[in-house]
Structure formats: structure tokens, C-alpha cells
Amino acid sequence: MKKLLVLAIFLRLLVAAFYFHPDIKTFNFQASFLGKGVFDIYSYLVNNRENLTLKDGFVYFPLTYFVLGGYQIAASPILGSGFNSWLASASSNAFAVDPSIYKYLVVLKLPYLLLDIGIAFLIRKFFKDKKKGNLAFTLWLFNPFTIFLIYAYSNIDIFPVALTLLSFLFIRKGKSLPAAVSLGIAAGFKLYPLLFIPFLFLYGKNLKEKLILSVTPLVIFLAICAPFFSTAFVNSALISGLSTGIFKSEFVTLGVSILFFWALIFDKKMNIFNYWIVLFLIIFSFALFHVQWLLWLAPFLVIIAVKKSYLAILVFTLAVFSFSIPILYQDRFMTLGLLRAYSIYFDLLPTPFIVIQKIYDPANLLMIFHSIFAGGSLVLTYRLFKQKQ
Amino acid sequence: MNFVKNMIWLTIITVLFSVFILPGIFALGIRYIPYDIQPPLERVKNIYGKYTIFQEFTSQDAQLTGIAMTIKNPNLKNKKDFFLDLYNDQGEMLREIKFNGANVEDGSYIKFLFDPIADSIGKKYNLVLSNPSGDEEEVLGIYYTLNKPAWIGKMTFNLEEQEGGISLVTFHKPQSKLGVIKTIYSNWLSRLL
């Protein structure tokens, strides 16, 4: 097992060093202001937009800022003196050809590695059978999907993902308060765990547990956000595309509502784990999702694939299609743009969207992939709920 | 158990392939390479009607096959044809490339590609950018820089010499596909080691 772990870390470091997504530079540039004493990053970025080289607002929630900023301060001796000018560089070519880029990428992604390995150990705790626990541990460490999701796309969502998994582990052990606290802290990084609150309310066995599970995460989230509440915070984070994009599809609202009413009226013994999976299967089936969001579901699907091994192939197929969807977006950084740390020559190649456009409508192909994913999700949902009955 | 074993092999192969082989495969698709990175985008000159830009430059490599620059077209107002004419230092027109404003999103990086000029290395050229049928509402903004490299020469706007030069990039047809792959991997390794 130790050898496998070393190999898994080695593979991760390779992808971390050489695959570059510009988000990592943007949110680390913003987080670097913590080291300069900036507390309210939302207002600071809006008020100083004119003087900043990168002008984006901070779209994440406060804990992301403090954790990334704090880590940068701790890692500054390794990152070196040129790091801040690299972060602030607005020239899309100059920073990509900087010889230190590989060091920066590895150092900035080290917290991801810690959480990633931590998730593997958390997953193992979901199994009473040690052998199955080890299989799930191995499957988390050795699947190409999560490695690329986390390290190629510089996925900051690993923080809330680790915390939501921890929350489910507490729920499984009947510890409602720690579960609710973990979920609230996860929402302090990114809003999506709060989507699950209505289901947690239904899951509570009595009024006290219902209130602990549903109110505590909200209170913690509000307490984290309260010091930053301003127009800048609302516009940058709370109602940004990242927070509200999910509900742009009415099918998502419809599907989530059906799931909620099913739980409310028919399901008297809710398997809360299955509801989490189905909630996000609905979202990914119908919403135009960011590739990074797929990580929200990944550890839960690994657990399912091991617990119900007959579903492993279906889960694998869904992973392939869910990955194929963002590749078809008209966004260089879903595909070829990730190779800019090798060479900026890759900017000269057309994206898959452009190539496919020459022979077929990529938007139509996207819909086909979404439909296939939705079909597979429906079968998985059926099997999860049928198994329970 | 077998599924997990297969996934271990799939992961190892996918990662090693993606890190070491995939860039080489994609490099096979590169048909032209830039001489240098684009100079900074600092200021804009608007071209329309009789207002044209002349720019001198010296090609730093053989097989000149394209020129790229960043162009403003606010709200896609310009939907007319505009031109890049390329002259040698004798004043003979070598290439004329037509583009339509409808295909130029505001601030986009536009590549004017043409048949390669084989013996271009070290030779001086003039390019002329014109938007003859555009009026004041249909201007196209050409980005230029005050910090130009030495190979970008004199810029003239409305027949008056200007400070700086267009933030342009020249493209050159590679000698061979293998040459591109070698360049990419050697640049990568030189930065790595």
C-alpha cells in the first residue's frame, strides 16, 4: 500500500507541475493581498480595480481567501522573490515562459495534494470491511479523472469537497453537530454544500436533529460571511455566475424539486448519501457546469463503485461523458490551453470546438453528451433507490 | 478487484502519456510558429477611410507566413472588409490579405496568414493596414507599443511618423514537423533543468 501511495503522489506531482490552468494564477494573485494586510478582499479589488494588473473580482467565499493567502505567506520562502511579480503579470505569454512556473505550480498545488491524500483516507473510513476500504482507497488514488480534475484544472473545490466528505462521515456515525459544522465550513469556501440543507432537514430524525443539521451550516456560513457583507461581496461572490449558474436551467429546478418532494412524501428511511449523489447527477445532467464542479461528486461515486461493484462500469462511463462535456466548451483552458507551461505554441492550435465545428455542430454534440449523461444518471438513480427498497 | 487493477494501469498510462507524449502529438498540428512573444498592448490607433497605418519590420526568420496583431472592434460595429498589404523594401506588393470586421471580436488576436516567403530572413518589409470603407463609427483600433523590440521599425499613421510600433508577431513555417516537436521539448527541458 505504501508503494502505491508513493506512486500516486509521483503521478500527481507530474500533472501538478506541467499542467497549467489560469485560475490558479488569478485566485492566488488575489489571495496574495492577505500578506499585504488586506482583510476585505471583495471591496479592495473593486476599489482598486484601476491600479491592478488583473481586474477580476474575487468569486470565492472568505475561507478560500484566508486559507490560500495564509498558505502563500507560509510558503513564501520556497516561492521566492519573483513570485509576486509572476502572479501580477498580465502578459499572457511572459508568465507562461517564466522558468520558475513549474516550481510555482507544484508549491501552489501542494495543499491540494494533502487534501487529496486526506480524502483517500476518509473514503477508507466509509467501509467496515477493510479489504473493500483498501479498494476504495486505491480507486480514489488511481483514477485519471480526479488527478486531472484536481491538478490540471487547479481545482480549489478540493477544500469544500474534503469537508463535505467529512460531514457525511459524521452523519454516518450519527454525529449531527460535527456534520453540520463541517458542512457550514465547507460553504465558507464555496456555496454549493448549502444546496443540500433541505434534504438534511428532512433527514433529521426529530425536530432537534432537523434544526441542528439545517440551521447550523447556515449560521456558520453567515458568520463567516458577515464581516464582508457589502455590494462588492454580493456582486463578486454571492450572485456571481459560479454561485447562481446551477439554476439557469429550469430542468435542474424541476429535478431537484422532484427529489425533494419524493423525500418529503414517500421516503421514510432516507439514505442521505444517495440523495447527495442524485442531487448532483441532476445538476450535471441539465446545467452548463464547470469541469471543476465534477469533483463535488467524485469521492462519493468512488465509494458507490466499490460498495456496489455492479455499478462500477456505469460510474466509469458517466465519468467519461461528464469529462467530455466541458472539453466541447469554447474555452481553450478546458483542453489545449492547459499545455501552455510546455509551450505557448499550443495557442496556435484550434480547440476541439473549432475542429468539430468544421464537420458538425458542437452545441448539438454537447446536448447529445448531456442527454447520454442524463440517461446514465437516471439508471444509476433507479439502481440506488431500488437497492434501498 | 479486477476493475481497480485495471484503473491503476489506466491511470499510470494516462498520466505518463499526457505529461510526456501528448504535447508531442499536439505539436504535429502546429503549421506555423511565432518568432517572439507579442509586445505589450499599450495604446491604440484607429484606422478608417483615409487613415491607414504603415509599419516597417525586419523578418527574423525564413518562411514568413503570417502576421498577427490585436485589433479593437467595439460592439462589432465594423462589418466591412479591411486589408493588410505586405510590401518589400523596393515597394513591391508581395501579399494582400482581406479580412472582414464581422469576424473580429473586440480585442481579438487576428492572424493574417499567407503563402510563405521563403527567403524572408533578415529582410525588411512594410505592412499597410487599411479600413477603406469604414467611417468614423466603424473604426478598427490597432494596438501598438512604446516598448517595441529592435526588429519592429518605424510606424507611420496618417503619413506622420509615430513613436512606438504595432504590437505584432510574425509567423514562420517550420522547416519540419519534427523540428517543431524538438523545439517544444528542448524549450521545456531547458526551463526545467
Image (cartoon, rainbow, N blue to C red):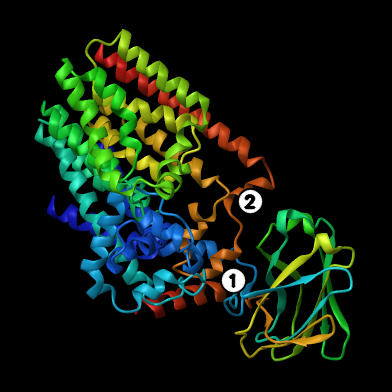
Which circle, 1 or 2, is nearer the viewer?
2
Residue nearer the viewer, B17 or A176: A176
Q: Disc 2 is attached to a residue of which chain?
A: A
Q: Residue at x 15, y 44 (%)?
A: A121
| Above/below status of B56 relative to A268 | below
| Above/below status of B163 relative to A66 | below
For the question of whether residue A85 can be seen, the reply is: yes
Quarter of the image with the C terminus of chain B in it: bottom left
- Image spot of residue A267 (x, y percent): 28, 11
**Amino acid type, residue under disc 2 in the picture:** Val
Residue nearer the viewer, B165 or B99: B165
- Image spot of residue A204 (x, y percent): 19, 19
Quick one: label 1, few (<14), some, or many (20+) residues within 10 Å? some
Q: Residue at x 35, y 78 (%)?
A: A82
Q: Residue at x 23, y 38 (%)?
A: A220
Secondary structure found at label 2? helix
Left or right: A76 with respect to B142? left
Q: Residue at x 36, y 27 (%)?
A: A279
**Amino acid type, residue under disc 1 in the picture:** Lys
Left or right: B18 with respect to B110? left
- Image spot of residue A118 (x, y percent): 18, 48
Residue B12, label in figure: none
Q: Disc 1 is attached to a residue of which chain?
A: B
| Residue at mark 2 | A355
| Residue at mark 1 | B177
For the question of whether residue A21 can be seen, the reply is: no
Secondary structure found at label 1? helix
Residue nearer the viewer, A384 or A250: A250
Q: CA–CA distance between discs 1 and 2?
A: 20 Å
